[in-house]
Image (cartoon, helix red, strand yellow):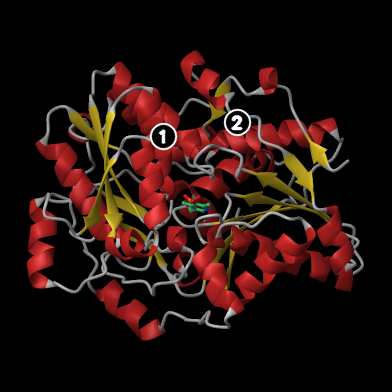
Amino acid sequence: MKKILLDENDIPTSWYNIQADMPHPLDPPLNPKTYEPMRPEELNVIFPMELIRQEVSQERWIPIPEEVREIYRMWRPSPLYRAERLEKALKTPAKIYYKWEGVSPPGSHKPNSAVPQVYYNMKEGIERIATETGAGQWGSALSFSAKLFELQCRVYMVKCSYDQKPYRRVMMENWGAEVYASPSDQTNVGKEIQQKMPDTSGSLGIAISEAVEDAATHDNTNYALGSVLNHVVLHQSIIGLEMKKQFEQIDEYPDIILGCVGGGSNFAGASFPFLMDKIQGKKPDLRAISVEPLSCPTLTKGQFRYDFGDNVGLTPLLKMYTLGHNFVPAAIHAGGLRYHGDSPLLSRLTKEGYMEAVAYHQKEVFDAALLFAKTEGFVVAPEAAHAVKAAIDFALMAKRDNEEKTIVFANSGHGHFDLSAYDLYHQNKIQDYEYPEQLINQAMAELPTF
Ligand SMILES: *Cc1c(COP(=O)(O)O)cnc(C)c1O
């Protein structure tokens, strides 16, 4: 079978919360000023109560509101494909599957969380929502979702993407959002940085600081984050829950699950429903492997410790793998993977050995994306191409060892707004960049100690 499809009625009715099954509980987020554990009410300045409840919930299943399921129907359940033509090209005995999230209107997995986030804000009377976007995928997903519930949407878009990806901005504007290049003149943080560093190309950390300030200083406005946090990972579990049903339908179970990791939401969402089986001892041999760029090697070279989520130190401190909040990543094309930290849940499971991580160079990742386009047809986002590269690698290892492994990867989105990067690839201008150990140590030395 080429693609395994589910009926609309098979859209899960609850999200899966791995906190119920964590071998050890998470360390609490800390107040950025006092370093004391945050009280939920403190977060209420920028988040609705329901999302704060989900952030700390220990319930295994959290019901998906019917209004949200209704919107999910626009593109869910998403297809699970068997990559037969890629398998043939590799001459591998492995079976390769991919869960395709490029079918959503904004083109990635991100609306899986943007839709419920806007919904809960709307329910609690919020009229306007502020966020940041790097590559433009999260900003698009939030703009789309805000329009569906008639909230205003303000997006701080990292300056280099704003300049390089005008079409992502236009897409957000099509859904009615206001988009500013960050650092902007709309916030105090932005104005200060503009003064200090007039030539800066911006960073995700700076844009987060701007959006958080915007939300904290407007009563009718909340902030929304597209990855990292537990409630985002929770919403993304819809990916893995559907995958489980799809594998049941063909009477299979994966040996290896792969996904690219920026903040960890698509891969955590795809893998956690399977990791539940591993943690519970039902599938001890299952391997869940995060894939990241060597230019931003958070899991493979970072440290597991408390750090801020943004550059300025406005957000709570989270215990996670981090390269340091002052880390300035190289301008690689997988913009969505240029974040210094990672989901605390995914970090913890990696630290405890339930998950693994690998890292690749940019050029080999594009090679893989091209082979994928030429066999399977889809032009994937440079972020998703990291998962493609790993799937190819593991399929070739299976060939070497003559093993019939079942490999599945989360294919997080399409690359239709990344064609200028593909153009550079064709001109042989894609450069590799490995983040130097020395700079990592330098950024680490600037982390809070207590
Ligand atoms: C944002 C994005 C990512 C990275 O974010 P995660 O939270 O790690 O999933 C990966 N792929 C695509 C297509 C994205 O838009």
Residue 46 locus on image (x, y percent): 22, 35
Decide: marks 2, 1 in contact (CB < 8 A)?
Answer: no
Q: Earlier in the sequence, mark 2 or mark 1?
A: 2
Label 2 sits on residue = 75
Residue lying farthest to the top in this orientation: 66
Above or below, 180 against 430 in this view is above
- The amino acid beneath tag 1 is Phe
Residue 424 locus on image (x, y percent): 53, 76
Counting labels gives 2
Q: CA distance from mark 2 to mark 1?
A: 13 Å
Distance from mark 2 CB to nearest ligand 1 atom below 8 Å = no
Please report the residue visible at 47 percent of the width from the left and 16 percent of the height from the top: 67
Q: Is residue 401 left or right of residue 220?
A: right
Please report the residue visible at 48 percent of the width from the left and 42 percent of the height from the top: 110
Q: Secondary structure at mark 1?
A: helix
Q: Nearer the viewer, residue 431 or 209?
A: 431
Q: Quadrant of the N terminus?
A: top right
Would residue 69 be visible to someone looking at this image? Answer: yes
Q: Tag 1: Cα neighbours inside 10 Å, few (<14), some, or many (≥20)?
A: many
Please report the residue visible at 54 percent of the width from the left and 60 percent of the height from the top: 383
Q: Is residue 137 left or right of residue 124?
A: right
Label 1 sits on residue = 144
Q: Is residue 160 left or right of residue 275?
A: left
Residue 412, disc = none
Would residue 62 be visible to someone looking at this image? Answer: no
Q: Nearer the viewer, residue 128 or 99?
A: 128
Q: Nearer the viewer, residue 169 or 436?
A: 169
Q: Secondary structure at mark 2?
A: loop
Above or below, 381 against 7 in this view is below
